[in-house]
């Protein structure tokens, strides 16, 4: 494989690839769609210690849970994963609501149920808003390179949504824009899910700390009360003995 570049910056990039290729380390290649990431990856493979082995195309995003869903995900797998997630949500909400209400006095159960429902709905709305915002921003940046050569109005449509990008590709071209828009949308969904997972983890930590701090304070207060009661009991016991000494004399 021989890569030919006219740009001086690309020549420097290829020299860096040749230096990195001799090390047995993972390499992350980032860049906008259509900037030649796959070409650099192939050059890296060609110059590496595994250059004689066949090149295997893989997903354009890191492996792991994010790769469960993509353009070629089968419908049965999608349905199965959706059932698992829906079951997990259903089995979490009811016990959590029961635990919250059981920790309150009977006269505060109504207020506690209302607050719990309000917080759950507020979290859902904020999650949708955060996920939608992240998805929109990531998609716009991911498809920017593929839509760079379009006129401004068509470029704005292509960067708005994958559906509009497919419409632009069908009527004005280029034909590859539709596929690049699909890839950009899937990538944006993956990034949005990661942001949502990070937000949930942060919320769980805050809730855990919030419940742990009052419990620690309550434990300390209980220990202090017990110590005070023990001290007072000791003083009460010592007082008659002191008073009985003059009577014995």
Image (spheres, rainbow, N blue to C red):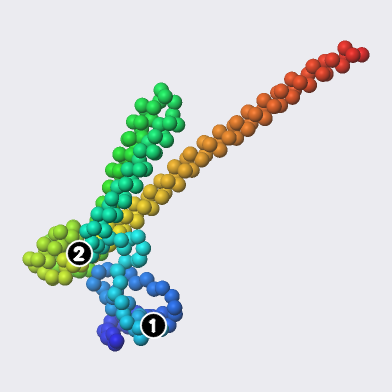
**Residue 188 in picture, x, y percent from top left:** 27, 59
Coordinates of residue 189 in the picture (x, y in percent): 27, 57
Mark 1–mark 2 distance (CA, rounded to whole Å): 32 Å
Q: Compared with residue 196, is residue 44 higher up or lower down, i.e. above or below?
A: below
**Which residue bears the numbered disc 1?**
50
| Percent x, y of residue 203 | 41, 46
Snapshot quadrant of residue 166: bottom left
Task: Sort mark 1 into few (<14), some (14-19) or many (20+) by Cα contacts within 10 Å.
Answer: some
Residue 135 numbered tag: none
Residue 228, position as x, y percentages in the image: 67, 27
Specify the quadrant that holds the N terminus. bottom left
Asked if 196 appears above or below 113 in the picture, the reply is below
Q: How many marks?
A: 2
| Residue 104 against residue 140 in the figure, above or below | above
Q: Is residue 170 above or below residue 102?
A: below
Observer-nearest of 192 and 143: 192
Residue at the farthest right position = 249
- Which label lies toward us, 1 or 2? 1
Is residue 110 visible in the rendered image? The answer is yes
Quadrant of the rendered image containing residue 31? bottom left
Q: Nearer the viewer, residue 200 or 33?
A: 200
Q: Quadrant of residue 232?
A: top right
The dot on residue 181 is 2
Q: Who comes first in sequence, dot 1 or dot 2?
A: 1
Question: Who's the residue at 32% across and 43% down the image?
Answer: 90
Q: Quadrant of the C terminus?
A: top right
Residue at the spot 78% in from the left edge and 21% down from the top edge: 238
Residue at 32% in and 82% down = 54
Tag 2 secondary structure: helix
Badge 2: residue crowd in 10 Å (few <14, some 14–19, many ≥20): many
């Amino acid at each position: 494989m021989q890569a030919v570049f006219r740009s001086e910056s690309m020549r420097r990039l290829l020299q860096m690839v040749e230096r990195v290729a001799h090390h047995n380390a993972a390499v992350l290649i980032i860049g906008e769609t259509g900037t030649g990431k796959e070409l650099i990856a192939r050059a890296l493979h060609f110059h590496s210690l595994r250059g004689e082995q066949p090149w295997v195309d893989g997903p354009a995003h890191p492996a792991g849970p994010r790769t469960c869903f993509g353009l070629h995900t089968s419908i049965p797998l999608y349905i199965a994963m959706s059932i698992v997630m829906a079951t997990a949500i259903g089995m979490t909400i009811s016990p959590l609501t029961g635990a919250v209400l059981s920790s309150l006095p009977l006269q505060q159960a109504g207020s506690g149920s209302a607050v719990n429902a309000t917080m759950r709905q507020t979290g859902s709305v904020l999650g949708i808003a955060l996920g939608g915002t992240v998805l929109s921003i990531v998609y716009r940046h991911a498809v920017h390179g593929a839509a760079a050569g379009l006129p401004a109005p068509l470029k704005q449509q292509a960067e708005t949504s994958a559906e509009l990008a497919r419409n632009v590709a069908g009527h004005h071209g280029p034909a590859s824009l539709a596929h690049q828009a699909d890839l950009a949308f899937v990538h944006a969904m993956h990034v949005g899910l990661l942001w949502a997972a990070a937000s949930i983890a942060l919320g769980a930590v805050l809730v855990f700390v919030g419940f742990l701090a009052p419990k620690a304070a309550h434990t300390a207060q209980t220990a202090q009360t017990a110590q005070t009661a023990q001290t007072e009991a000791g003083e009460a016991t010592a007082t008659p003995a002191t008073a009985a000494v003059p009577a014995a004399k």
